[in-house]
Amino acid sequence: MKTIRIAVIGAGVWGDTHAAIYREHPLVEPVAVCDKNAQKAQALAEKYGLSRVYSSVDDLLADGDFEAVSIVTPDFLHADIAVRCAEAGKHMLIEKPLATSREDVFRIVEAVKKAGVRAMVDLHNRWSPPFTEAKRLIEEGELGSLRNAYFRLNDIRWVATDMLPWAASSSILWFLGSHSFDTLQWLFGDRVTRVYAVSSRGILDSLGVETEDTFLSTLEFANGGIAQMENGWITPDANPCVNDIKCTLTGDRGMVAIDASNHNLIQFFSHEKVTVPDILVRNQIHGRVKGFAYESIRSFVDKLALDEPFTVSLEDAASTSLAILAIMESARTRMPVEVDYGPLG
Ligand SMILES: NC(=O)c1ccc[n+]([C@@H]2O[C@H](COP(=O)([O-])OP(=O)(O)OC[C@H]3O[C@@H](n4cnc5c(N)ncnc54)[C@H](O)[C@@H]3O)[C@@H](O)[C@H]2O)c1
């Protein structure tokens, strides 16, 4: 099978994740990296043996000698790059969220359609083992009709204060809420029609990161299911995991309860604290990358090579961004908001 030549745009924390699996994938030839910070681009190129290094997307696209790109720039900087890559005929794996404004969502969807390229958004919780198992149980009817769900997906506050230099220009809803919303719409197999949300802020503001601390969002699905999402960036830094992930899914025949962070398959004790090492998301076994954060990227390549539909459709990623905009509006107005999917229907 022919290899796919891929360029990575954005050489930060998560660009490294994309480059790591591309280096291993037998169907990929990772060829180029682009970051507006030339030093970061150079460092990633050296780490993964990429020969072509660019500090502007224009220069990368002028080179053009590749079939696909990973877009791994900050949340609010996906749209212009995605539209230009689509116009240049490149297939795309876009980091979540697809985009952070209604206009940008539809600009990308239109550009992809017009150019006839393929695009997937890296909503990778669909590859997380406890959630894929929950999906199997739901599909096999073990839960009966899914009636309600609770999904907590929080980060320790270090992610907002130290890890992401751009946290104040984004929101925990874009950063993690996009995962929880997409997971719920996938598990329910249904569209969310109405949302009602509240938010609070103050802790991150006081630490110099001007964004909301936490959101509680209620979702109503078209077929009567209901769900509650909790997304916060203020879990204390001493939490044993970077993420705090809890989920219950209740149907009329059964219930699934997930604790994907404090699973206690392994604990590490130092003299200062106890941690639960990551063995699910991004880990290595004998020098090879494992974990569901790599599986979603691997799947993008496999589906592209086999010309099969992606596990996350562009429509689902678009509806996730549109619903999060509705959640933000609801939190602002303290009123329920109908989600307007526009031409997506
Ligand atoms: N799937 C996941 O769970 C997951 C986890 C972490 C991050 N992400 C996503 O990945 C994306 C990047 O996050 P990150 O943590 O790597 O951020 P980061 O700040 O570490 O890296 C972003 C990089 O993009 C570069 N950049 C900014 N504008 C650019 C431009 N116009 N052209 C080229 N490069 C540009 C920056 O210089 C920086 O190096 C975000 O959308 C984030 O939500 C996803």
Image: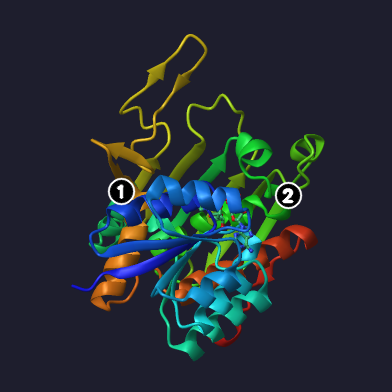
User: How many numbered discs sit on the rendered protein?
Assistant: 2
Residue 150 image point, x, y percent: 49, 49
- Element assignment for label 1: helix
Residue 168, numbered circle: 2
Q: Is residue 127 visible?
A: no
Quadrant in which ligand 1 is drawn: bottom right
Viewer-nearest residue: 314 or 162: 162
**Mark 1: few/some/many CA within 10 Å (<14, 14-19, 20+):** some
Confirm or reject: label 2 Cβ below 8 Å from ligand 1: no
Q: Amino acid at mark 1?
A: Pro
For mark 2, give the secondary structure: helix
Residue at screen point 40% across, 73% down? 66
| Residue 110 spot, x, y in % from top left | 55, 86
Q: How is the image coloured?
A: rainbow
Residue 158: assigned label: none
Q: Residue at x 41, y 72 (%)?
A: 68
Q: Which residue is mark 1?
A: 129
Badge 2 density bin: few <14, some 14–19, many ≥20, Cα 10 Å: some
Q: Quadrant of residue 259?
A: top left
Q: Nearer the viewer, mark 1 or mark 2?
A: 2
Q: Amino acid at mark 2?
A: Ala
Across and down, in percent, residue 328 comes to: 70, 61
Q: Quadrant of residue 238?
A: top right
**Position of residue 171 in the picture relative to residue 5 (left or right):** right
